Image (cartoon, helix red, strand yellow):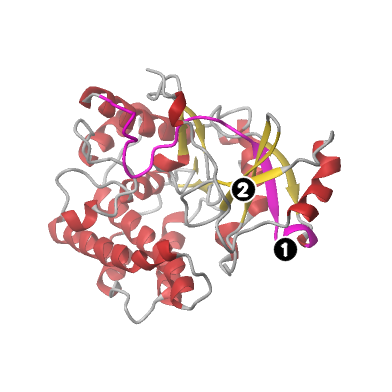
Amino acid sequence: MSTQALLDKAGAVRAGEELDLDVLRDYLQPVLGGDISALQVQQFPGGFSNLTYLLSVGSQKWVLRRPPFGSKVKSAHDMGREFKILSALGDVFPYAPTPLHFCQDHDVLGCDFYLMSCIEGVVIRKEYPPQMVLTPAQVREQFFTLFDVLGELHSVDLKAAGLENFGKPEGYVRRQVEGWSKRYYDARTPDAPDFDKIIEWLHDKMPAESGMARIIHNDYKMDNVIWSADNPLKIIGVLDWEMATVGDPLMDLGCTLGYWAEAGDPEHHRQFRAMPSDAPGAPTRAEIVERFAQRTGLTVDRIDFYFCFGMFRLAVIGQQIYYRYHQGITKDPRFAALIHKAHSLHKMCESVIERSSL
C-alpha cells in the first residue's frame, strides 16, 4: 500500500508565530553553506507545545524547532536538552531525527532553537485520512507496532548511548507525582476541575522505587511518530523529544496510555482522543499492556496508578497551555477547548480510582 499523497506537509506559518526570515537567513548562511537566499519557512500543523517549522531551499529541507511564544515553563521547552538526547540516540535508536545545529544566540529568534534532519512520511492524528483505508487487522498491527517501538526505546543500553548520567532516575516516580501536582496548582484557573482527591490518591498509591532506569520519551503518541509512505505499518521516525529523560519506563507507558481512548470509553473522553485508537481492530489498553510486558520482559503491575497518572499529567499539560490562553498570553483558538479536556480527564481519573483494587 502506497500513501505518497498522505505525506505530512507544512503550510503557512500561524499568525503570531512568524520567524524573522532575514535574520534567520543571515545566521544560517555559514551553517548550511551554499546559496540560501531563496530560503523559505513553513510551519507543520498540530501540536500545542514546541513549534516545528520546515525550512527549504529548492529540494533541500531542514526542520527547525523552537519553544512556543509566551511560554514561561522553561523546563518543558529546553532546546539544548532535546538536541543533546537526539545527538546521543543517533547510533542506538534508528527512529530519531539527526540533529544538525543548536543555536543559543537569542539575537536570532529570541530563544534557543535547533535544526534537525527532515524525515518525510505520514503523520496520523485524531482520525485516519480518508485515503488511508486499513483493515481491522492492519489497524491492530499498526497500533501494536506503535508500542513495540516504545519498547525498543526502553531497551536501549544507557551506557552505549552515553546517557548513563542523563536525568535523575532515583526517586523519579515521586518527583513526577509531586512535580506535576505543583504544576497543576500553579496553572489552575477558576474554571478548572478539582483534582485534589486524585492527587492524594496518586501520592498514596505510588509504587516503591523500582530501580529501573531507561530512556523514556515522555510524550509518545501517534502524531509524534512518522509512518512510511510506502508501508503505513512501518515507523520511520519518532519526533518531539523535548521531555525525554532517564526514568521508570512504566511511567512512559502510562503517559502514552493517558492519550488512549478506546471504543468502550465514554464519549466525553473519546471526543478528545489524539489518535484513532477507537477504530475497529484497535487493541484495548489491557491488550497493549500484555503485549508490552511480553516484548520488553518488564513486569507491568499497578497499571491503574500509571494510567491514572498519565491522564492526570495530560490534564496538567493542557491546563498549562489553557492558562496562557486564559491570561491572554496566546490567542490561538485551539487552546479554548483544553479546559473541557481537563474536565473529561478528571472524570476518567475518577473512574479508574473507583474501580481500582490498589
Q: Earlier in the sequence, mark 1 or mark 2?
A: 2
| Position of residue 125 in the picture relative to residue 349 (left or right) | right
Residue at position x 34%, y 82% in the image: 190
Relative depth, front residue between 358 and 196: 196
Q: What SS does tag 1 mark?
A: loop
- x then y, percent, for residue 192: 32, 75
The residue type indicated by label 2 comes to Glu
In the displayed structure, 244 sits above or below 56; it is below
* Quarter assignment of residue 84: top right
Residue span colored magenta: 107-134
The quadrant where residue 311 appears: bottom left
Disc 2 packing (10 Å; few <14; some 14–19; many ≥20) = many
Q: Which quadrant holds the C terminus? A: bottom left
Q: Magenta stretch containing residue 110, yes or no?
A: yes
Residue type marked 1: Gly
Depth order, front residue of 228/38? 38
Q: Is residue 329 above or below residue 260?
A: below
Q: Residue at x 28, y 30 (%)?
A: 291
- Judge whether residue 23 can be spotted in this image: yes
Badge 2 marks a residue whose secondary structure is: helix
Question: Mark 2 highlights which residue?
Answer: 82
Q: How many marks?
A: 2
The overriding secondary structure of the stretch rendered in magenta is loop
Look at 17% across and 54% down and name the residue there: 267
